[in-house]
Image (spheres, helix red, strand yellow):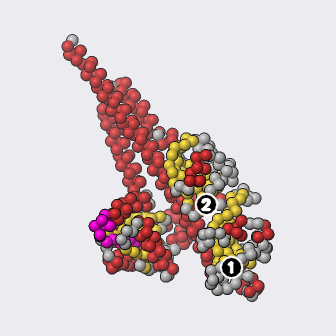
Amino acid sequence: MKGRRGTWPAVLVFILAIAGISAAQLTQSYREALEAGYIRSDLSGYLVSEWIAESFSNVELVLRESLAVFEGSSVRSDAWTPAEKRRINGALVRRKEMHGHMVFLGVFDSDCVIRFGSIAAIIGDSSADLNRRYCTAVSEEPVDQLKLSEFFVSATGAMDVSATYPMFSTTGEITGFALAGLDLSFFQRWLDEIDDPTIAITIMDLDRVLLARRPGSSDIGRQIDDVMLESFITAGSSHQSFRRVSPVDGVDRIWTLRTMGDLPFVVAAGYDVADVLGPWYGKLATSIVAVILLSGASIALGRAYDKNRLRAHDMEVLAMNDQLTGLMNRRSFEEYARARIARAHLHDAGAAFIMMDVDHFKRINDTFGHQTGDRVLRDVSLSIRGSFRASDLICRWGGEEYLAYLPGADLENALRLAERLRESVERADFGLDGSVTISAGVTLLRDDDRLEDVIRRADERLYQAKNSGRNTVCH
C-alpha cells in the first residue's frame, strides 16, 4: 500500500511534467512557425520587388536608347529627312516589339507633340491638348529619372501605365522625352507562373489601386479600401510585417508590405495563417493525446522537439542563403558586413568591396530560357566562391549582381582578384553559343564609411565598367 501511495504522486508529477514540457514546446513551436511565416513573406516580397525594379530598369534602358539618336540634334521632325524619319520610327517599332508588354514607344518634343513613334497614325498629335499628366510630370523634380504616370484600365481590361525619360540640351534644358506605354498585365502573367500554391502576392500603386494579384481577383483596377495599408503608404515606410485579414478575400494571413523606392508600387506578400500553423496544430493534437495516454509521451515529444530544432535551423539557413546560388543573401550580407565594417573602423583595418554583374544576362534569359539563366548564375557563383578567401563575405546582391567584402585587402589585391575572376569566367565553358562575361567595380573602405556609402561607390564603378564596354574591371 505504501508503494502504491508513492506511485500516484509520482504519476501525478510525471503527468504534470509532461504537460509542462508539452506546453513549453508548443509555445516555442508556435512562435517559430509564425516567425518562419514572416521570414517567408519577407523573402517573397523582396524577390517580387527586385523583379519589378529590374523590369523597369530595362524600360528605362529602352527609353535611353530611343533618345540616343537625338543627342546633339533637335527632336522636331522638320529637322529630319523622310528617310531619317523612317529609320528612326522603324527602330522604335523594333524596340517596342522586343518587349511584349509595350503597347507604344515614342519620342515627344518639349511641347508634348509626338514627333516619332511606333504607331504611325498618331505621329504629330499633341498630348498637351489632351491634358496628359506625363506632359508636365516629365519636367518636375527630380528631373533626370524614369517617371510613371497615367495608370488606367485599357479597353482590354488590362492596367496600363506611361513611362517617360527626359532629353536635355547642352545647356541642361529639357528638349523632349521618350515615352513607353506599358501593359501591366505582364505583372499578372509573371505572378501566375509562381508555383507556390500557398502564397498570396498583391501588386498595387501608391493610390492602393490593385494592379495584379495571386490568386487572381476581379478587383484589378479598383482601389483597396484599407486603413492600415493607407497608413503604411502615407508614412513612407520601406517595409513592414504583420498579421492581418486580407481586405481583398478575407483570409487571415501573415504579410510583408514593401514599397519600391522611386517606383510608385507597393508589393504585399502573404501566407495563410492556417497553412503556416498547420504543422503546429498537428503537434497540439499529438501532445493532448500523449498527455492523456501517458504512454510513449517522452519519445514522441523528444522527436517533435528535435524536428522543431531542425526546422528552425533550416529556416535560419533559408533566411541567410540565396536558394539559387547557395551564396549569402542580401539581408544576411548586410548584417555581417555592417558588423565587420564597425570592427574595421575601430581597429583602423582596411577592406575592399567588389560589385560584379553578369553581362547581357537578360539576353541569355531571352535566348536560352530562364532555366539556362539560372544554371549560368549557379556556375558563375561557383567561380566566384572558388576565387575568394574563406574570410571574405560573398552574396548574391540581386538578379545577376554579386557583392564581395574583402577584409584587410588593399586596392592592388582586390583588383588582382577581380581581374582573375573576370578571366576565369570568360574562359569557362557554360555550354552557350559564345562566352559568358562579367563586369566588376572595385572600391576601398574609407574612414567613417557606412555600408551604403561603399556599396554606392562599388555600384558606380560597376556602372562605369558597363559603360566601358563590359567584361572589364573599374575602380
Residue 413, position as x, y percentages in the image: 32, 77
Task: Single out the mark in the foreground, 1 or 2.
Answer: 1
Measured Cα–Cα span from mark 1 to mark 2: 25 Å
Q: Is residue 223 something that shows in the picture?
A: yes
Question: Which circle marks residue 264 in the picture?
Answer: 2
Q: Is residue 379 left or right of residue 62?
A: left
Image point 53% across, 68% down: which residue? Answer: 365
Question: Which residue is nearer to you in this view: 240 or 245?
Answer: 240
Q: Which residue is mark 1?
A: 175
Residue found at the very far top of the displayed protein: 1
Q: Secondary structure at mark 2?
A: strand
Q: Is residue 2 left or right of residue 329?
A: left
Compared to residue 397, the image places residue 210 above or below, namely: above
Figure quadrant of residue 71: bottom right
Figure quadrant of residue 356: bottom left
Tell me where the magenta segment starts and ends, as one range.
Answer: 343-354
Q: In what quadrant of the picture does the N terminus appear?
A: top left
Amino acid type for the residue under numbered disc 2 = Pro
Image point 55% across, 60% down: which residue? Answer: 260
Compared to residue 33, the image places residue 61 above or below, namely: below
Q: Secondary structure at mark 1?
A: strand
Amino acid type for the residue under numbered disc 1 = Thr
